Image: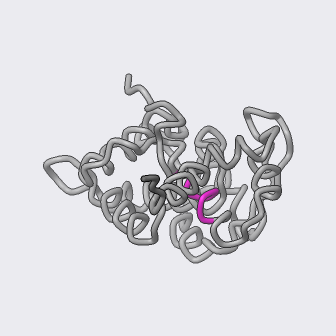
Amino acid sequence: MAQQTNVYHVEPLRSMEEIEEMKLAIKRGNKSKPKRSGLAKRDVLLFLMGINTGLRVNDLVRLQVRDVQQKDVVTIREGKTNKKRKINIGMLQQEIIAFIEGKQADDYLFSSQKGNKAITTTQVYRILNDAADLLGRDDVGTHTMRKTFGYHHYKQFKDVAILQEIFNHVAPSITMRYIGIRQDEINESLRHFRLG
């Protein structure tokens, strides 16, 4: 069984270029033969849902077609916290509509190749890890999607309080460290620092 990299070693994708590279690597896969079209579409949509919603991977894999069908906002009960959360998915409607065409309402959105079962979090890790290997990265795991969401949300809105609430963290400092902003700020502050 694949083991996930430490949550704090896993990094967000900090640029749109890195996100596009990851999408292409996920679509291609890291095997000797190209990934089947249906799997490539599933895996890319899963990645897009992860980086655009900030959902934990265990909540992503539990989604069913009915949860996202003809909806811009989805209400879920988070597995880890058992709290209800409203998730905006309107930005992905085109991709979702194309992907769920012909699927039944009770099908898992991200189903396994082995019947109507959800893919496992381990499978998601392998998908992301294969793509990361192709890109020569060792800092990608399932938390990369959530951290990427948080990193870019913070960069755009500069509101750690909203992110803290979204992520259900107890302190802003935890949120900043989780998304990698604190280390970026430290690095920037030391860039031109010199004594003597």
Camera-side residue of 136 and 2:
136
Looking at the picture, how far across and down is residue 169, in whole percent? 77, 41
Q: Quadrant of residue 34?
A: bottom left
Quarter containing the N terminus: top left
Q: Is residue 32 magenta?
A: no
The image shows residue 183 at horizontal and vertical percentages of 54, 49
Residue nearer the viewer, 144 or 74: 144
Please state if 101 lies on the left or on the right of 39 as rendered. right
**Residue lying furthest bottom:** 94
Q: How many marks?
A: 0
Q: Which residue lies furthest to the right in this view?
A: 84
Residue 155's quadrant in the figure?
Answer: bottom right
Q: Identify the magenta region.
A: 145-152
Q: Is residue 111 above or below residue 89?
A: above
Magenta part, dominant SS? helix
The residue at 46%/63% (across/down) is 192
- 28 sits to left or right of 100: left
Measuring from the top left, give residue 85's x and y in whole percent. 82, 50
Query: At 55% across and 40% down in the image, what residue appears?
Result: 118
Q: Which residue is drawn at 67% across and 63% down?
A: 154
Q: Is residue 97 above or below residue 12?
A: below
Taking the image as shown, residue 34 lies to the left or right of residue 156, namely left
Residue toward you, 174 or 121 = 174
Q: Which of 26 and 103 is in front in this view?
A: 26
As drawn, which residue projects farthest toward the left? 32
